[in-house]
Image (cartoon, coloured by chain):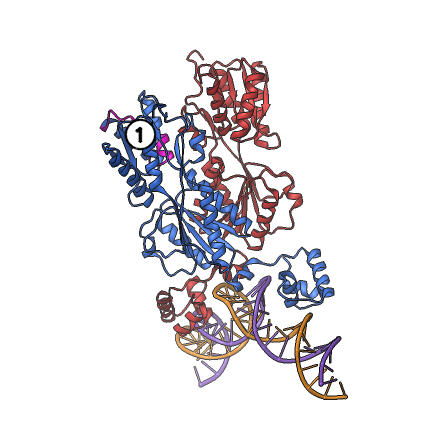
Chain colours: A blue, B red, C orange, D purple
Amino acid sequence: MVSIREVAKRAGVSPATVSRVINGTANVDPIKREQVLVVVDETGYKPNELARALFKKSSKIIGVIVPNIENAFFGELARAIEEEAYQNNYRILLCNSQNNTEKELLNIQTLNQLNADGIIIMTNSENLASQMGPCQVPFVILDRKIEGLDEIAFIEADHYKGGRMATEHLLQCGCKNIVCMRGPQKFSSGQQRFLGYLDICKEYGLKVQWLDCDYDYEEGLRVAEELLSEFPDVDGILACNDMVAIAAYKVLLSKGFHVPEDIQLMGFDNIRFSKLFAPEFSTIIQPIKEMGTLATQVIVQYANGEPIQKENLFDVSLVERQTTRHTKEK
Amino acid sequence: MVSIREVAKRAGVSPATVSRVINGTANVDPIKREQVLVVVDETGYKPNELARALFKKSSKIIGVIVPNIENAFFGELARAIEEEAYQNNYRILLCNSQNNTEKELLNIQTLNQLNADGIIIMTNSENLASQMGPCQVPFVILDRKIEGLDEIAFIEADHYKGGRMATEHLLQCGCKNIVCMRGPQKFSSGQQRFLGYLDICKEYGLKVQWLDCDYDYEEGLRVAEELLSEFPDVDGILACNDMVAIAAYKVLLSKGFHVPEDIQLMGFDNIRFSKLFAPEFSTIIQPIKEMGTLATQVIVQYANGEPIQKENLFDVSLVERQTTRHTKEK
DNA sequence: AAACAGGTTGAAACCGATTTCAGGTGGAGG
DNA sequence: CCTCCACCTGAAATCGGTTTCAACCTGTTT
């Protein structure tokens, strides 16, 4: 690899001048500029980003910490983040934490040591902040609030509204006996969705019934079994997310229930598979792409010294597909 | 952020000594060593990885280039790579290329400028190598051969065997009219699987019938429609991968066909969703995790100057689930 | 013709690590 | 007691960029 000094020598100028030509940071005599450009072209010179980042204290790297990249929701977020980062000439350093707090901490440290420009974090680790050493890198929290971490921005969807809409929809589809497989109450997403469910039940005078369920498929399987034995006359299930909804569907299928004839089913998130599945799932749409894009933009803006909005609540909407059935007579 | 000079000053030693303590690269007087460790602990000093990487010409970063992270197959590969990289104290820089050659080239360049230790690439770009500038970073190619690129290792599954097994299985399940939705013939995966299908057809004297189909869901929908109109008495479909199999299933469902009663269906890859789907898909298992792990190990070994194996063919196997039905009378 | 403003330029310092190399110390051996 | 060797140690060079700063050149003003 040819260095800036080598280019300078060949072009008969100083490294400083080469730097100025490359970065356009100052005027350079057109003749010298041309000489430099010729040599750059001949040698295929590309500045070493490490050296640059070392001096500038910015590596144009954004760290992305997700609990599980195989989880479609995070996969889709990661994709949106990567895309937007690329557009802005940033690169993505990915950490798949598997709920391993130690791994998250180590990755945060690495990002710090790499002069990263920002960290977008989605995590399950509640007490991450307390265990974390000093960190220069600005944080953006996506989807799940972390106590004690002073992030530059927080981005989430309106889970409460989503919870309300989902429950109300089941109601309008004729369900009398709605059971909520509520998500982890340590997350605001879990809390707010459940609160939405609760409030609708209260407003319509419905019986409140629920079970706790983590956000993953295997848990969904287990809890759905439990649900059927505990609430035998259930006719509507509000799953905490799409993966759990799919798990519930499979359990219902194996027990001989029909969806939506016997039992109706609502998911949450609108991951891509919720539409690919057979039947296609009615669910609450979180604007996943927009959220990921914004997370990245916030970091870019912050790096540029632009003002940013700290709290960002994204609107949600409902899509009715094949697992619920809107009764015509409302 | 405190620097090594700061630590050295506080501990009353030189930066060289601090470096030696941190890295254990030379003996240091136990007393001084202790002083250094105390200061390191007090200040929370962590060496700047950029400075280190600049000097060492190795940033402990592995680039991962995938065509589409939302595609479960690549998502699962990425996960395995990240996991193994973490175990070896490497980090992952992710590029989701969306089949955009320019984006791939730019990311390769960036990785080069970052003194990355290796690039694991899965791409659709055929003529990537010819457009690529000089690159110091060693490549490992996963899943899809790239002509003209001199990689340090190539890793793929035994697609030919998989193609044979899948076809033979459909045959044993009583299919008389197997249609192959073959994958892109520019990839060895597409070629080899199709070759397996062809050879089994020849050996059993079967009629050969196929359509071309890209590896994605939307294509699967389109081609499956075409398949039904072109081959009305099909009773077995060999999809080029699991996503296409799912698409085919949905088309069959919408046309009123029953799977596996009317038409049997084989996928390929064994992505997680092939088992989560309803019905669960019979498919060919690629050892995704093992392949990703090996790709990473190869790079680590190469960085350590250890010998590595260039060509790596992974065995595949067949899992019979609900979309095929093994007839008892063989 | 001298003074001054404005624009280019390169030497050198800097970012924060690692490693080389030469000098200093202490103990063993003659 | 002197020599030699082994072992620590720190000054300085290095990695490859960027930026500061002072010097220089050109052309204009008085």
Q: Quadrant of residue A164?
A: top left
In the rendered image, residue A238, in percent from the top left (x then y), is placed at: 32, 33
- Work out which quarter of the rendered image holds the C terminus of chain B and state it: top left
Give SS at disc 1. helix
Say which of B169 and B221 sits in front.
Answer: B221
Quick check: is A235 in the magenta stretch? yes
Q: Is residue B262 above or below residue B286?
A: above
Q: Quadrant of residue B113?
A: bottom right
Q: Quadrant of residue A281?
A: top left
Name the residue type under label 1: Leu
The residue to which callout 1 is attached is: A171
Q: Label 1: chain?
A: A
Q: Specify whether A128 is left or right of B179.
A: left
Quick check: is A214 in the magenta stretch? no
Report if residue B24 is visible in the image: no
Q: Total number of numbered labels?
A: 1
Report if residue B297 is visible in the image: yes
Residue displayed at 46% across by 14% down: B262
In magenta, the rendered stretch is A230-246
In the rendered image, residue D2, in percent from the top left (x then y), is placed at: 48, 83
In the rendered image, residue A35, in percent from the top left (x then y), is placed at: 73, 62
Residue displayed at 33% across by 28% down: A172
- Work out which quarter of the rendered image holds the N terminus of chain B and state it: bottom left
